[in-house]
Amino acid sequence: MVFKLADLARLFNGQIRGDPDVEIHGVATLDNAGPHDITYVTNQKYYPALSKTLAGAVILTANNADKCTGNAFITETPRLCFAQVATLFSPPIPFEPGVHATACIADDATIAASAWVGPQAVVEAGAFIGNDAFVGPGCFVGARSVIGVNTRLVARVVVNYDCAIGGNCLVHPGVVIGGDGFGFANSGSAWLKVPQLGGVRIGNDVEIGANTAIDRGTMGDTVIGDGVKLDNLIQIAHNVHIGDHTVVAACVGIAGSTRVGRRCAIGGQVAFSDHLEIADDVYIALGSRVTNSISEPGNYSSSLKVEPAEKWKRNLIRLSQLDETAKRLKALEREIERLSGARKT
Amino acid sequence: MVFKLADLARLFNGQIRGDPDVEIHGVATLDNAGPHDITYVTNQKYYPALSKTLAGAVILTANNADKCTGNAFITETPRLCFAQVATLFSPPIPFEPGVHATACIADDATIAASAWVGPQAVVEAGAFIGNDAFVGPGCFVGARSVIGVNTRLVARVVVNYDCAIGGNCLVHPGVVIGGDGFGFANSGSAWLKVPQLGGVRIGNDVEIGANTAIDRGTMGDTVIGDGVKLDNLIQIAHNVHIGDHTVVAACVGIAGSTRVGRRCAIGGQVAFSDHLEIADDVYIALGSRVTNSISEPGNYSSSLKVEPAEKWKRNLIRLSQLDETAKRLKALEREIERLSGARKT
Amino acid sequence: MVFKLADLARLFNGQIRGDPDVEIHGVATLDNAGPHDITYVTNQKYYPALSKTLAGAVILTANNADKCTGNAFITETPRLCFAQVATLFSPPIPFEPGVHATACIADDATIAASAWVGPQAVVEAGAFIGNDAFVGPGCFVGARSVIGVNTRLVARVVVNYDCAIGGNCLVHPGVVIGGDGFGFANSGSAWLKVPQLGGVRIGNDVEIGANTAIDRGTMGDTVIGDGVKLDNLIQIAHNVHIGDHTVVAACVGIAGSTRVGRRCAIGGQVAFSDHLEIADDVYIALGSRVTNSISEPGNYSSSLKVEPAEKWKRNLIRLSQLDETAKRLKALEREIERLSGARKT
């Protein structure tokens, strides 16, 4: 596939500075790009590389165009334009529809004629695989579950019974959708399982990263909104709701019945307690602990910062004494007030 | 399945306030319940919904019965009674025993006549699948491993060689039991693997959540006690012992050779160092770090709390100065003592 | 397999104190060892057991030899010697080369004659399985991916398309290599996927623990160096580089484009921000948060420490007031200076 730089600029609303006729064959990093690759820059860490790149063109903002000695594709949204250009150069790999000979399909499962079910996959009774859907090698789709139009289960994905995934979703290997929620009642001497009778309902345009787990609801459903993007190794507990277009980085855990709003961005390894309400447009920093509901949009954090271990150790001892320290400070304030008063008198 | 409310009260020791003859067909949430559903309430967040529910009956404590305008099932243990009622309405799904045509079973593996081995499953030499056990689609049971009576491996579970799982266990998709422990010896220029020669021994009535990993012991076994409940995405390292009836929430990591007592409750994303001893009846809050042994039962925490990011940032700078601050405070105390003394003199 | 203690000492450069002719049949823990087992001790927690062990021999340092009442194998590196002895007693289990009848192999995939592809495995077009490699039950090797000489994918491992794993690697069940990196561009109303066009390149002698995920690069590759050891449930994001011989404990998350140096040791549940540079020989304590680059070797930490919950709660309130507290302290210092000055005047 080859496009002239001018064609790309026309398609994605960019301005060109340099040669509009340079032929672009693909995308590459600033470091590796050759004279027919297009690349982009937004992170200032990479500005110095701009004067050395061999790229055929660089997508960047007007502010940075001067730093670039080659051809520039100027836009206010370089990352978005790059994503559009890269998507143009890497269209989805087409597949032949059908069912692989080694797949096990229940008699009354429905597989759309345009769908593909790969080797070693299992589709149980009453399941429905929509048009153009892709059920990759080793996937399991349980009884009565629905895989929406054009959704792709890459490989070895488990969708347990009575779950529904919308259209245009991408689910990476090792994902488990619809495991039981973690609910037990104390019977005195042991834990009695609370049956997990709900399902999981996932919207359209959702991406779910490798080895992420989304549990089924206790009675209602666990719900993932449209356009949500979940990274790898995330835990979504029973009855959680995640609002449309929220993004969640890897290793996050969201405990039972917590509701996260729309357009939130959750950093890696954040932990949420159960039964919280998080507003729309909330951003939470890497590794924070969220133990209370958040009602206002904005940036939140309880992320710490590594220090040389010896220094950290001394501060950690003081952290353990904070309440006592605060009391000593209060006592000093009183004493000084007394001394000052005494002196004034 | 239909029960009169009076029948349920008789079965599970409840008192009825309202119509004992109302027919109950199933369970539902307070919000969704209809006139033939039973529901329950314990969390005060949901008290207001009690006056609006259409539920046929609500399980609650005597204290809350007045808040309920419909039929009440009164008990001191509403959550436990609900679990019992819900279990009554959702008996285990029966399965036909046998071995699916696509499963690979070693010649000398033993599969009980009442057990089921599903499609694409693999059972290696010398493995033993007990009575009424269920080895779901795509599961792998390694050489000489034992799956106890009535235990269910839902789908795509890996039980590596020489591991034993007790009876009445439930193991969710993606679980890996018996991977090698993480043990290496420094040979100067590289890491030499320490062979992991032990196994994993899991008791009865254990539940293990999706994508959790339990490593085999180095020489002895990694041991999970009876009635333990492990949530999703948990790491149990080699030689760990977990005492009976302990519950562990998602994303927890327990490092090598640590022993956790009985009836403990570990919050999500807690991290344990290696070689610790944790007493019985210890409760640890979400996201805490446990770097020392705990010898007394009780509640423990090092869980932080998100704040608006700007405020957190200022406090974080001060946290980094704590030791210095403490020294300044000490100096002030001395100075004031001196001043006070001077004044008194 | 039987060795005299004298033979082991000769093979691994130990000194014997006691009976050189005792026959050793295997390894065991200090507690469980019998008269023909060899064991080792390094952790002082286990010194008291030295006088009670029934072991045929104990590997330990000269300093500890006096604590041992039985036969001693003396060396300055007991753990390394133990690893060597245990490796001697547990040679790799040999396998018959070939391809299992239920495996699905693309016509133009290359499987070395000495390799094994197990039941239910899938190997796609253009993939290459090297000499003596082992592709276990249920594994998936995507198009054009390479599995190096003598590398073992234990079971149910996913190696997505265009990834390369070196020689002598060991990859545990549930690992996902080559899932898409987590990259999206904000299009205003939604998130547009940034195509993930790179691969994953893994060196020689690498071990990867159960359910760990390593994402493919955005344009270049995600790179894991030679001799790296990754524990279970680790997240390695796109474009990350990990230097040779670095070890990473379980549940760690490393965000996009971060580079970790050589010979580092990363504790469990550490979280790294994206685009960081971590020097060689950096050690980071359990559960720390790394949000800045680290340019100097050494020990780093932001690990907290559980306290009794009531005490922690009081200190946590003070933590939230630290900036205010620091200002009060500053005010006090000024006031005292004024008082002191006044007094002196």
Image: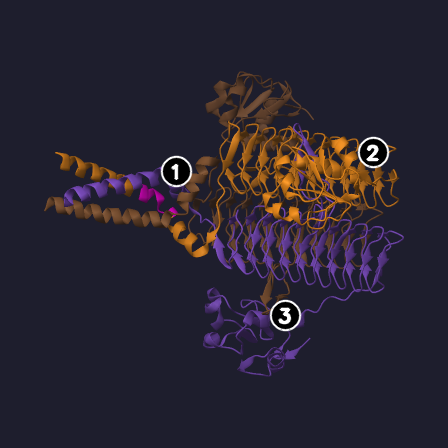
Chain colours: A purple, B orange, C brown
A217 horizontally vs C264: left or right: right
Q: Nearer the viewer, residue A57 or C324?
A: C324
User: The C terminus of chain A appears in which quarter of the rendering?
Assistant: top left
- Residue A138 within the magenta-colored segment of the rendering: no
Q: Position of residue B323 (x, y in %)?
A: 34, 42
How far separated are the C-alphas under marks 2 and 3?
53 Å
Q: Nearer the viewer, residue C158 or C23?
A: C158
Left or right side of C305 for C217: right
In the rendered structure, find residue C41 and report the number of the disc placed on it: none
* Dots 2 and 3 on the same chain: no
What label does residue B132 carry, if any? 2
Identify residue type, mark 3. Answer: Ala
Q: Nearer the viewer, residue C67 or B162?
A: B162
Q: Nearer the viewer, mark 2 or mark 3?
A: 2
Are the two marked residues, 2 and 1, in contact with CB atoms closer than 8 angstroms? no
The residue segment tinted magenta is B319-326
Locate residue A247, reporting x and y percent: 59, 59
Amino acid at dot 2? Asp
Q: Position of residue A147 (x, y in %)?
A: 77, 58
Q: Quadrant of the N terminus of chain A?
A: bottom right
The 10 Å Cα crowd at callout 1, few under 14, some 14 to 19, many 20 or more, is some
Q: Let me know if marks 3 and 1 both belong to one chain.
A: yes
Secondary element under disc 2, as helix, strand or loop, is loop
Q: Residue under circle 1?
A: A317
For numbered disc 1, what is the local secondary structure?
Answer: helix
Where is mark 3, residue-wise?
A: A86
